[in-house]
């Protein structure tokens, strides 16, 4: 508000308007306007009775004073509504203005509206929940000092790192020890936290550790670890990492780490544990006492505040928990099978020589190209070098080769004719292993495509006249020479003509050759 008392007092001391404006932190126009109105109203310093700046404002500028129909905002209602998810002070001010217009009342401007509420919150010592709404934030971090597990054989002390998660509104906490701070333990810690709380918050605030955040710049958007971001999407939450070297962005986690350093780490410093399970059981017992400990400056405890104020605002858990995945990169080879954990999985042959992303879980293997899934397989277990092939991923000629087997070959030959079926069965039975005959069977099918099915059936019939077990070579020779086209009469005539051309007598050596003659 304008300092009317100071303006009139300084003017009575003979100071210039420029000096008065500088001292009172207002413009020279404001000073001139106040002095002109005071002259018209015959108001001068000193006053007979002390007047406040507000009273002088009403005397000097009565036209600027709102009438009696200006409605004060309901600060208690505003405070209760701000605790609800998605409700902001700007939204409540817009609703307040709309209500005033419907009732022919004059609303306050947003700045006044906000000032009245802040004054109310400060006077009543109420906590402003603009940034700590129930079910909105969960802060997570690793505690700085580790606990230790003793190896029962060697006596070596193995460090165990403490994971801490805190709900910002109720201060309800979860703690668990892990043998390392790798990504698998980081993800599992979050899954165990969601199960412990019975839900998850809308925002998770981690530190800038590499298992959660790849890069976080001052002005650029942070780049979240792919697996961590995938886990957040599965639970419908969002990752908003704290700024680098800004611990006040997650004060609850930092404060809880300090408390737990006394309640757990310091308390268990002289104990010996021989397994991580044994350590966690003791940690959870101390955690239960920590959450049930009464607050010092307000009624209740972390547990009671969680149950009464925050639990109902948590997002429900999905039907199935998130399954930890590992991402690897691979280039599709010429046999269109990528390798994951020493197993081979097919992808569409169109992606040969392209780089793809492979997502591996305990049950599935999925292949992505440009963030689009192009293949999915049930993960293979057991002996290495197993293959999982989807026929649709194969080229057409490879697919045709794959669908042929003994039954398919015999069915095809049966449709050609009875002789072709007998020959096909003979070829298959000739080999000790069925798969060894597939090449010959496929060649017989190709002969049908080359010479027609009618000629193939005739050639098979002709071959069966000579032998009960004709080979593929016999069939090919008959078709090549055209013997399948000759009738029985033509064959007989051909045999007669050959007989006529042969000499009537045989070749004999004579008696001289056997010693009957004279030798000189």
Image (cartoon, rainbow, N blue to C red):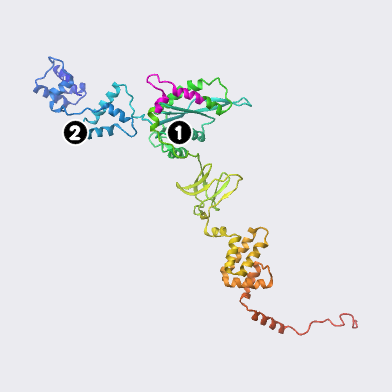
Q: Which image quarter is the C terminus in?
A: bottom right
State the image coordinates of residue 99 (x, y, percent, origin top left). 22, 34
Q: Which mark is residue 101?
A: none
| 479 vs 3, nearest the viewer | 479
Count of all numbered marks drawn on residues in the image: 2
Q: Main secondary structure of the magenta part?
A: helix
Residue 276 in the image: above or below residue 51: below
State the image coordinates of residue 286 (x, y, percent, origin top left). 49, 23
Mark 1 Cα shell of 10 Å, populated few (<14), some (14-19), many (≥20):
many
Q: Which residue bears the numbered disc 1?
A: 194
Tell me if 45 is positioned left or right of 439 in this view.
Answer: left
Give how far apart the Cα atoms at labels 1 and 2 are.
47 Å
| Point 41% across, 38% down: residue | 236
Q: Which residues are magenta?
A: 283-307
| Point 50% across, 22% down: residue | 264
Mark 2 Cα shell of 10 Å, populated few (<14), some (14-19), many (≥20):
few
| 252 vs 277, nearest the viewer | 277
Q: Which image quarter is the N terminus in?
A: top left
State the image coordinates of residue 489 (x, y, percent, origin top left). 65, 81
Q: Is residue 115 magenta?
A: no
Q: Which mark is residue 103?
A: 2
Q: Are marks 1 and 2 in contact (CB under 8 Å)?
A: no
State the image coordinates of residue 41 (x, y, percent, origin top left). 9, 22
Callout 2 secondary element: loop
Dot placed on the residue nearer the N-terminal end, 1 or 2: 2
Q: Is residue 169 visible?
A: no
Q: Is residue 178 visible?
A: yes
Callout 1 secondary element: helix
| 98 vs 485, nearest the viewer | 98
Say which quarter of the image contains residue 410.
bottom right
Q: Is residue 304 magenta?
A: yes
Tell me if 350 is positioned left or right of 39 in this view.
Answer: right
């Amino acid at each position: 508000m304008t300092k009317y008392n100071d303006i009139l007092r300084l003017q009575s001391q003979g100071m210039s308007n420029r000096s008065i404006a500088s001292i009172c932190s207002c413009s020279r126009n404001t000073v001139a306007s106040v002095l002109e109105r005071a002259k018209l109203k015959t108001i001068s310093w000193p006053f007979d009775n002390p007047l406040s700046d507000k009273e002088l404002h009403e005397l000097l500028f009565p036209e600027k004073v709102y009438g009696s129909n200006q409605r004060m905002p309901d600060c208690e209602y505003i405070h209760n509504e701000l605790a609800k998810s998605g409700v902001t002070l700007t939204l409540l001010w817009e609703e307040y203005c709309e209500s005033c217009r419907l009732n022919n009342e004059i609303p306050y401007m947003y700045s006044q509206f906000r000032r009245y509420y802040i004054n109310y919150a400060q006077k009543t010592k109420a906590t402003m929940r603009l940034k700590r709404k129930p079910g909105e934030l969960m802060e997570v971090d690793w505690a700085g000092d580790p606990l230790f597990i003793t190896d029962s054989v060697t006596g070596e002390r193995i460090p165990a790192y403490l994971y801490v998660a805190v709900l910002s509104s109720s201060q309800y906490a979860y703690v668990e020890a892990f043998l390392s701070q790798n990504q698998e333990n980081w993800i599992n810690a979050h899954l165990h936290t969601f199960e412990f709380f019975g839900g998850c918050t809308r925002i998770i605030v981690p530190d800038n550790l590499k298992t959660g955040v790849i890069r976080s710049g001052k002005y650029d958007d942070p780049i979240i670890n792919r697996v961590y971001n995938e886990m957040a999407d599965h639970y419908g939450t969002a990752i908003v990492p704290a700024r680098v070297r800004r611990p006040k962005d997650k004060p609850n986690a930092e404060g809880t780490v300090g408390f737990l350093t006394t309640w757990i780490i310091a308390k268990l410093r002289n104990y010996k544990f021989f397994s991580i399970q044994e350590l966690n059981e003791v940690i959870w017992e101390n955690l239960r006492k920590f959450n049930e400990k009464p607050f010092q400056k307000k009624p209740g405890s972390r547990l009671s505040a969680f149950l009464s104020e925050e639990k109902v605002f948590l997002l429900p858990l999905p039907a199935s928990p998130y399954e930890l995945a590992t991402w690897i990169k691979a280039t599709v080879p010429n046999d269109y099978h990528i390798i994951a954990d020493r197993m081979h999985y097919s992808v569409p042959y169109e992606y040969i020589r392209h780089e793809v992303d492979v997502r591996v879980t305990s049950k599935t293997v999925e292949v992505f190209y440009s963030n689009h899934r192009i293949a999915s397989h049930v993960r293979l277990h057991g002996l290495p070098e197993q293959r999982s092939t989807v026929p649709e991923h194969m080229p057409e000629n490879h697919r045709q080769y794959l669908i042929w087997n003994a039954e398919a070959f015999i069915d095809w030959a049966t449709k050609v004719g009875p002789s072709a079926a007998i020959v096909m069965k003979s070829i298959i039975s000739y080999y000790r292993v069925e798969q060894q005959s597939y090449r010959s069977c496929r060649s017989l099918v190709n002969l049908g495509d080359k010479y027609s099915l009618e000629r193939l059936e005739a050639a098979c019939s002709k071959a069966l006249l000579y032998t009960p077990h004709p080979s593929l070579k016999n069939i090919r020779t008959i078709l090549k020479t055209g013997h399948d086209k000759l009738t029985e009469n033509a064959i007989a005539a051909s045999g007669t003509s050959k007989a006529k051309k042969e000499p009537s007598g045989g070749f004999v050596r004579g008696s001289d050759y056997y010693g009957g003659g004279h030798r000189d």
